[in-house]
Amino acid sequence: MVYSVQKKIYRILKSQVINIQIFVTFNYCNSFSEAGKQIFSYICGLLFKTKILMALKLGITIGDINGIGPEVIIKALANPRILKTFTPVIYGSYKVLSYHKNIVKDLNVNFHSVSNAKQALPGKINLVNCWDDNVNITLGKATSEGGKYAIISLDKALSDIGDGSIQGLVTAPINKNAMQLANFSYTGHTEYFTAKDGAVQSLMFMVSEALKVALVTNHIPVSKVASSITKDLIIEKIKILNKALIEDFGYERPVISVLGLNPHASDDSLIGDEEEKIIRPAIIEVKKQGILVNGPYAADGFFGSGLWRKADAVLAMYHDQGLIPFKALSFGTGTNVTSGLSFIRTSPDHGTAYDIAGTNMADESSMLKAMFTAVEMIHHRQEYFSSRENALVRREKQTAGLNE
Ligand SMILES: [Zn+2]
């Protein structure tokens, strides 16, 4: 037990610069009894964990200032667990957030203004003031200003994630019409981050405790779905999904179920043939590469019979095929994750909800979930890479021993 705790502390110490004194005392003081060492290592582990958790900086983009984004950010950050878990850094404006704070009454939320994320302090709700303009807030309306400031917030957060000032990103919802009015040339956040991150391919991945669903095609017309699905695309999506489950969610050997495209997964090519021509060959190909994948399943039966419970994640062919069961089973507790990027990005599973903007009716639970999911994912990724690094060092030492 001591060894495993020690290993954990070593790993934390290696990846973070923290109290070396405690490390030395712990390892070299022989006057401790075994029981004493166990208790001491446990306390050290807790202290280190809290310290490291708080040191983790999570960026939060403000989204559309005319929607419910700022409201759910403020309400979520009022949760007492937040400041014990990570250091929030909002990308927005003091004036805009103060406006929304007046709508969300009785919440003791104070913003700590910083000029950049490097200055952000643990224990504070940090706010990077991305603009000083007096902005017209038109609640519940798609305006070019709403789009413009959402873009400024996104660009600033992206540059900070690029230089390591923040370790992950949670995005509040944007409105597609407002973004277009501001000449945003991407369909949504996912496409924006994929292009800016230089990723060849990314994956829209909806995550909740009950169910994890990823999509082969995202926001395209249904009339274009069948022609967009190729064997190579499915293979790539399965690989990104498998990698994300291992690196970001802590699975050792995840099981992925793939849905068909046609009703009854085409009934042996009686209703379409994409299953036999495209989906099944893709599944066979990734199986050969050692990924645990099964399907293609008829989507209705797969969810109706409860088969989805046996999969660690499900790959759906198009938006509604995956998101209808996901939202029916997880609404309000789901998180939207973009996998395949060089950084962790999550967002709540709702939009700008213009109809209730400014009414103080918005529910922050999905925003909270998005924040905690991002933190968990960052830790899983750090754990994954530090354990691989340790294994590499051990192997190198063994090889060196053999050569002697
Ligand atoms: Zn959508």
Image (spheres, rainbow, N blue to C red):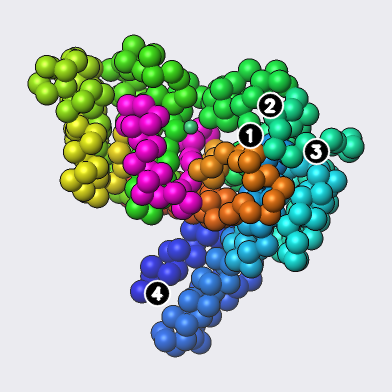
Above or below residue 188? Residue 372 is below
Residue bearing mark 4: 2
Left-right relation of 197 to 11: right
Q: Nearer the viewer, residue 324 or 191?
A: 324
Task: Identify residue type, mark 1.
Answer: Ile
Q: CA distance from mark 2 to mark 4?
A: 56 Å
Residue that label 3 marks: 137
Numbered disc in front, either 3 or 4: 3
Q: Mark 3 Cα within 10 Å, few/some/many (few <14, many 20+)?
A: some
| x and y percentages locating residue 65 in the rendered image | 73, 39
Q: Quadrant of residue 352?
A: top right
Magenta stretch contains residue 123: no
Task: Say what amino acid the circle numbered 4 marks.
Answer: Val
Residue at mark 1: 174
Between marks 1 and 3, how big is the CA–CA gap?
A: 14 Å
Disc 4 + disc 1, Cβ < 8 Å: no
**Which residue is found at the position 85% from the left and 46% from the top?**
95
Q: Residue at x 63, y 34 (%)?
A: 174
Q: CA distance from mark 3 to mark 2?
A: 13 Å
- In magenta, the rendered stretch is 316-342
Q: Position of residue 358 (x, y in %)?
A: 72, 47
| Amino acid type assigned to the residue bearing label 3 in the image | Ile
Query: In the image, is residue 7 above or below residue 63?
Result: below
User: Where does residue 324 sit, x and y in percent of width and height?
Assistant: 37, 38
Distance from the alpha carbon under mark 3 to that under mark 4: 57 Å
Do we see residue 237 in this rendering? no
In terms of image quadrants, where is residue 153? top right
Secondary structure of residue under mark 4: helix
Dots 1 and 2: beta carbons under 8 Å? yes
